[in-house]
Image (cartoon, rainbow, N blue to C red):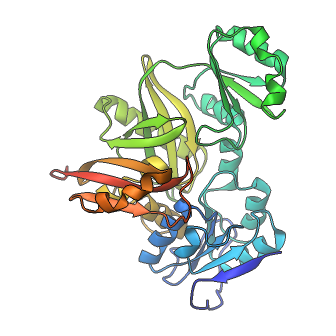
Amino acid sequence: MAREADGGGGRAPVERGMSAATPAGPLAAGSTIGIIGGGQLGRMLAMAAARLSYRTVILEPQVDCPASQMANRQIVAGYDDPQALAELAAGCDVVTYEFENVPVSAAEALAAQVPVFPPPSALEVSQDRLVEKRFLNSIGLPTAPFRAVDGDDDLAEAIAAFGGDGILKTRRMGYDGKGQRVFRDATGEDAKGVYEAMGGVPLILEGFVRFQREVSVIAARDSAGNCVCYDAAENVHVGGILRRSTVPAGCSSHTAIAAQEFAVTILSRLDYVGVLGVELFDAEDGLVVNEIAPRVHNSGHWTEAACAISQFEQHIRCVAGLPLGRTLRHSDCVMENLIGDEVFRAPELAAENNLVLHLYGKAEARPGRKMGHFTRLVTRPVRP
């Protein structure tokens, strides 16, 4: 059963003269955008929507979630609650989401009633690591070598094929390093009992990639097929969690442009609308795609401080049918996440010049929990 939390102000009835697939034109000021998911990404999307005079409704089971503090209204229910989905569709002009593990069936049900961006088909690709890698290879983009694992025997064969080394991952629902196990110099004996220990769910073993650095590109595509890309960021992960993004990345300009071209290829082949994050390895033999995220992305938080148009506003522009914004960067920068009790550094960080601090409104600072981020700016001339 769905309940709702009102963030202030009622909403006038909306007249729709549009198909459930694509909005008829730019959404008028005062229109309502639905956001599935109530975390910090939803929070920042709601903030960007408000700047463009749009109202937002959040669908999220957790009361007082970060996004609810910025949205006009919250529907407190599960992401697959039929009543809540019907309420969301009836009360919104377009729906988007802040994370990729939205049930595809729920996104498809919504798409039959109201425009949903990015399209549910993008969720199908990104929710399953095996499907994602096969998709990337099918459009000519390289990935790490991989094998499907549905039991200990499959794992033993995959370990042997990769010379004893690899990263075993759940095919679904893993994030920030969760649901993973590393093998080095392993043998078939090391595979015994692992499948059940990992939950008895479909797995994938990925071979290691030798790389110089991890990079990512945030890109956006509108419903007319126009694409824009932000500058490539160089990322540092610790324990599977992003700690720092530096822009510009330390790779060559040729590599940075190639990464953007990869992102545009993915956007186009998915017939995508919205912002997408692409994580890549800058490897010895060229770029290798690690994974894609059909949403705004942690490694793009720097755009909030170093660009006129952030990734969050860019996404709202896409789903609302507004023109794409320029991705020009006015400063070099370093974005760092505040994890767990690092959030208590906020007062000292707030005292720094040329630093933009963003806290997420989370009450409890738990280990491994993203509590906020900050971006240090290095002012420089804007490139023509």
The one nearer the camera, 251 or 185, is 185
On the image, the x and y values in percent for residue 26 come to 50, 74
On the image, the x and y values in percent for residue 323 come to 42, 66
The one nearer the camera, 124 or 264, is 124
Identity of the residue drawn at 78% across and 16% down: 191
The relative height of residue 363 versus residue 205 in the rendered view (above or below) is below
The relative height of residue 259 versus residue 307 in the rendered view (above or below) is above
For residue 343, side relative to residue 155 (left or right): left
Classify residue 144 by image quadrant: top right
Identity of the residue drawn at 55% across and 36% down: 240
Any part of residue 223 in sight? no
Tell how many labels: 0
Classify residue 184 by image quadrant: top right
Any part of residue 49 in sight? yes
On the image, the x and y values in percent for residue 154 come to 81, 18
Is the N terminus in the top left, top right, bottom left or bottom right quadrant? bottom right
The one nearer the camera, 224 or 367, is 367
Residue at the extreme left: 381
The relative height of residue 252 versus residue 41 in the rendered view (above or below) is above
Identity of the residue drawn at 75% across and 54% down: 104
The one nearer the camera, 129 or 255, is 129
For residue 216, side relative to residue 208 (left or right): left
Classify residue 59 by image quadrant: bottom right
On the image, the x and y values in percent for residue 304 come to 37, 59
